[in-house]
Image: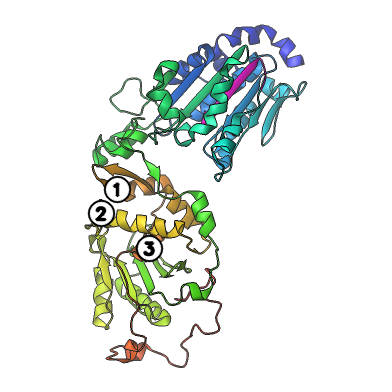
Amino acid sequence: MNGLQRSAKEIKRWRDDPITFVREVFKIEPDAWQKDYLLAYNNQQRVAAKACKGPGKTCVQAWCCWHFLLTRPHPKIAATSISADNLADGLWTEMAKWQIKSPLLLELFEWTKTRIYAKNHPETWWMSARTWSKSANAEQQSDTLAGLHADYILFVIDEAGGVPDAVAVAAEAALSTGIECKLLLTGNPTHLSGPLYRACTKEKSYWTVIEITGDPDDPKRSPRISIDWAKKQIKDWGRENSWVLVNVFGRFPPSSLNGLLGPDDMARAMGKQLPPESYNQMPKILGVDVALQGDDRTIIFPRQGLVAFQPKVLRNPDPFVLASTVAHSWDRWEADACFIDNTGGWGSGVISHLEQWGYSPIGVQFAGKADDAQYKNKRAEMAFEAAKWIKSGAALPDIDELTEEATTITYFHTKDQVQITEKKQIKEDLGRSPDLYDALGLTFAYPVAKRDPYAKYKNKTHENNYDPINHEFENGRDTDRTDYNPIGG
């Protein structure tokens, strides 16, 4: 290997000094905590990094992997993460990014989407991407990092805060098999279980634990975390808020901060088709999430039983226009109930217009008291009811944004109640408001009974809005499809 021969002296020096390796190979100065991590990785067998949001943890893992590949003879590295997409978009992309910065690494190694290998020794000198199916059982999960046999082995688990215990089992078992075997765990402390939690708590004596914080008052804080951002989160939510503990301080919350729904939950529901007879005797419900200004959207979401149909999306309509649109949707679909977001009073104008026209909308305060005392507020209750509905076999329209919103929402426990992360925090993570999921959640605000089918002909006060000639009936339409829009475009 020409590059190795030319750099033999440097490689020998770099082997015992990974900080100098980073400086000379990648032309960058590591942060203080990254130096601690590099030294721990090189000198210890087990290293766990418990990190706040965005300090550059995946970056330092990539440095360690390249250092191990270059300075150990015929090494094998197995890397995994919370999901295949996360591994591809995170650590594997970082490996490519830093290789491009080094002519030496470009000369010696070949990068592919699942494997990085030494060009002269592709069978024995490599790093591989390992993933597992979300439906895998514990035995299948443990196989993720199994099967490695070499004198020099490195196991890397990124986003370890949410990785199942079983994934780390094979790696831990293999640590005593070679000349130099190492295990690196790095992630956010989102769960009170799993390999990262064990490494930082009951098994701490076996690990070197690196704590990475964005705390504005900590002199060893990560400089990559904006002090202004960190101060704002603390001011807005308090130092003991679970989201702040995890994302600003890099500390475990009092209870696990968990996702409300996973990508697989949504994938099973997206585009699913159910026969009309499975839901057509159930009440028809409209959920209306109101946004009258800014970048947020107003959503009208129709749901009947286990089927949610295509929603109507509007941008900044005034109350009269929105009320007219809701009324048209209500009549067109012959809905049994309509729940309208009235948080902050934004929906009051819409509700008032509808009531004047003879409708009976129900305003919902997201911050109001939940019917079920286990939930902190109505917003948490509706979010959980929608999540349970989705997991129970529901059918959703195929909307990528809805999946993004549903899988971004997390929950935690405060005292004896369940609470979901504040909407401002979700908007910060998502880059927009979870309007679609909020509108869907509104369809679960209160129980609804199917109304009298002849009630529309009794005391009807909005006769001029009804068009018996152009009215579109459901008969003969493909209404069992989730891409069907019963309330119009």
Which quadrant of the view contains residue 322? Answer: bottom left
The alpha-carbon separation of the residues under discs 2 and 3 comes to: 16 Å
Q: Position of residue 132 (x, y in %)?
A: 59, 39
Numbered mark located on residue 439 in the image? 3
Q: Is residue 216 above or below residue 86?
A: above
Q: Residue furthest bottom?
A: 469
3 vs 1, front mark: 1
Question: What's the amino acid at mark 2?
Answer: Asn
Our reading of the magenta stretch's main secondary structure is: strand
Labelled pair 1, 2 in contact (Cβ < 8 Å): yes
The alpha-carbon separation of the residues under discs 3 and 1 comes to: 18 Å
User: Which stretch did the figure color magenta?
Assistant: 149-159
Q: Is residue 484 visible?
A: yes
Which quadrant of the view contains residue 365? Answer: bottom left
Q: Is residue 322 above or below residue 4?
A: below
Nearer-N-terminus badge (1/2) = 2
Task: Give the camera-side residue of 222 and 378.
Answer: 378
Say few, some or many: other residues with alpha carbon within 10 Å of mark 1 (under 14 / 14 to 19 / 20 or more). Answer: many
Q: Is residue 30 visible?
A: no
Q: Is residue 414 left or right of residue 151?
A: left
User: What residue is disc 1 on?
Assistant: 419
Nearer-N-terminus badge (3/1) = 1
Numbered mark located on residue 377 in the image? 2
The reply to whether the magenta stretch includes residue 156 is yes
Numbered mark located on residue 370 in the image? none
Question: What's the amino acid at mark 1?
Answer: Gln
* Residue at figure coordinates x 46%, y 23% from the top left: 48
Q: How is the image coloured?
A: rainbow
Q: Quadrant of the N terminus?
A: top right
